[in-house]
Amino acid sequence: MFKGKKVIALGERDGVPGPLIAECLEAAGAEVVFQKTECFV
Amino acid sequence: MTAYLRAAANVLVHVPDLVRYGSKPWRETSSSNQAPGDVFANLRSFDEAVGYPPNQAFIGNLPPENLGEIPAPWYENPLAGASPEGHFGEILPQDAFCALLEAADQFGLIMLDKERPVPGAVGSEAATALLKKENPSKEYGEEDISRRIEGGEALPLFQEGEIIGCVRRDHDSDESLDARILLENLSAKASGAYALSRLLMQERIAPEHVEYVISCSEEAVGDRYNRGGGNLAKTIAEMAGCANAAGVDVKSFCAAPVYALVHAAALIEAGVVENAVVVGGGSMAKLGMKAYFHLEKGMPVLEDALGGVAFLLTKNPDAGPRVNLEVAGRHAAGKPSTPQGLAEALVRDPLARAGRKIASVDKYAVELHNPEIMLPAGAGDVAAANYRMLAALAVMGGEIAREEIPDFVETHGMPGFAPTQGHIPAGVPFLGHALERMRAGSLRSTMVVAKGSLFLGRMSRQADGASVLIEG
Amino acid sequence: MDLENQAAIKSIADDIGSENLMVVLGMPGEGLRLAVETLTTGDPSWAGPLAGVSLGLPVFHILEETVRAEVPGDLYADKLLMMEMVLDLPQIESDLADMRAAG
């Protein structure tokens, strides 16, 4: 599903943060082109 | 030597006319040339802010747990007979805060119109004490004020839509001394000093008795060569009349208040000082942060108040519960910056080192953001998410079953009740409640857990956090 | 959704084309709904760079079945399993199903 795909990882501070989404997707073979963690506080 | 928590004070300053200078409203109104008056048609009156149940919980008149029994939306269900005077805090109206801003200013930055309507009485002993400690500053004429506003060197200060003065920049090419930045810093100073003054009044302590003040405020005080250089703590100590106190700032975004408690307790344990105050002033930048979501849903602008907190720690064992530095959590730079990584480092690990279970702590004071402010913006219920994470840790540790998560959250948690003021909601607003309950014998222990979004500064992708156990 | 993130994602989609790009989110609740809507049909608040822009990106949540099946098991168990308990996974999956059914 993710092999060779370009992916945007958009996480949240109190959910799953961006860097963790990116780590999981890279392990699944994706190329993470942008990652960010939103913070509302 | 051991450090004990003697007192806590929480204050709110209702500043509807400063919402326009919050970062989000300021950016929106500057880019669209829309008059702030049009954008913020739904600002609350002082009485509405006082009657708002979460605000009553913040100043100590309502147990936070009782919020769960008040029907939503809370802003439509004010507490009958609510008072701005609380068990361990108070709410100050804007006109009185204007006088505090002027008292906080030693450089002629706040220029108030001599013809402005002056409130008959400030109405707060704590605020009045601050006014007496500074010389009255020069008063200005309308022409002087409007000339500076029109010339672009000052921003107008309003009271109910009327210009009553201005705040001016102090350098024409140093953006760190820009009018809005200086207003932000003076707001943090004045609200922090107000919280400290309230703490001292509440406990009948002479300001001169305080030996050390640590500020956990977020503002970057300094000029262009040392933006963020700081020491808001010492300026707050000076304003509050703590002539014998040294001061220093401790910063780590929203985690700073807990670091500050730990540092203060450590200074006492080490015998450096006999008492220390932790103080946090309000964050003007966060006023109206999610206002557009609120307005879109027909809600009033709920981010209309600055928060302030102050805590007194002492070596006197009769004073209150112990700040137990043996159970203080820290999040190392090599740890994962995930909610799980933070919860493990801040709660599971320090308790395990002391041979204790997660469920052995009576109440956790996590980031106590008011969910009514957060949810409309899609920000989730921050307090509830934190409690569920602690419950999930207890599940992983075999302390409770997965089905018991809601019970754990109910027993060891509470609804969030603090305004979105960054560091202010960081667990510490519960300490006033905790002190009352510990003195009444209905609470044995509380662990304060705060987290900070380090990644917002673009220097690292890390988050941060700190925790400490307080027990009788 | 944060306006700067909207701008950044719009520029990436313009550069490499929506057809080669996917989005994986990590937030629950209303934030998830707002993000999905913003990245497919456009910013519902009409405040950001994606107002009126239908990127039509395929959007997933990191915890949903099809995505978590792709994450190596030990990594998932170590770092994501607990978030299932915290974020109410059944709710996330039903929210996504509703949004996808609504198109």
Image (cartoon, coloured by chain):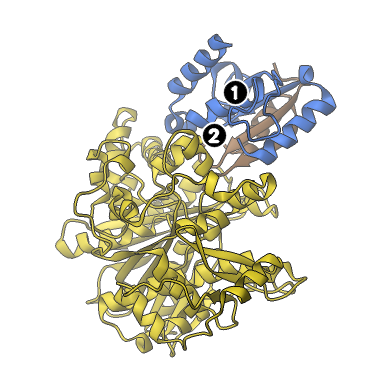
Residue B3 in view (yes/no): no
Q: Which quadrant of the rendered structure holds the N terminus of chain B?
A: bottom left
Amino acid of disc 2: Asp
Element under disc 1: helix
Categorize mark 2 by other alpha carbons within 10 Å: few (<14), some (14-19), many (20+).
few
As helix, strand or loop, the secondary structure at mark 2 comes to helix
State which tag comes first along the sequence, 1 or 2: 1
* Left or right of B168 in this view: B407: left
Given the image, what chain letter belongs to the residue carrying mark 1?
C
Which numbered marker is on residue B79?
none
Tell me which residue sits at (15%, 60%) in the image: B441
The residue nearer to you, when weighing B94 against B134, is B94
Chain depicted in blue: C
Looking at the picture, how far across and down is residue B28, in whole percent?
63, 46
Colour chain A appears in: brown
Dot 1, how many residues are within 10 Å of its Cα: few (below 14), some (14-19), or many (20+)? many
- Residue at x-position 45% and y-position 56%: B16
Name chain B's colour: yellow
Of B347 and B259, the residue lying toward us: B259
Q: Amino acid at mark 1?
A: Glu
Where residue C29 sits in the image (x, y, percent)?
A: 47, 29
Check the image and report above or below for B374 versus C75.
below
On-image quarter of the C terminus of chain B: bottom left
The residue that mark 1 highlights is C37
For residue B100, above or below residue B256:
below
As displayed, is residue C58 above or below residue B326?
above
Q: Distance from label 1 to label 2 (Cα)?
A: 31 Å
Q: Name the residue beneath numbered marker 2.
A: C78
Residue B77 or residue B433, whichever sits in front: B77
Residue at x 78%, y 70% (from the top left corner): B173
Residue B400, by quadrant, is: top left
Q: Residue furthest right?
A: C15
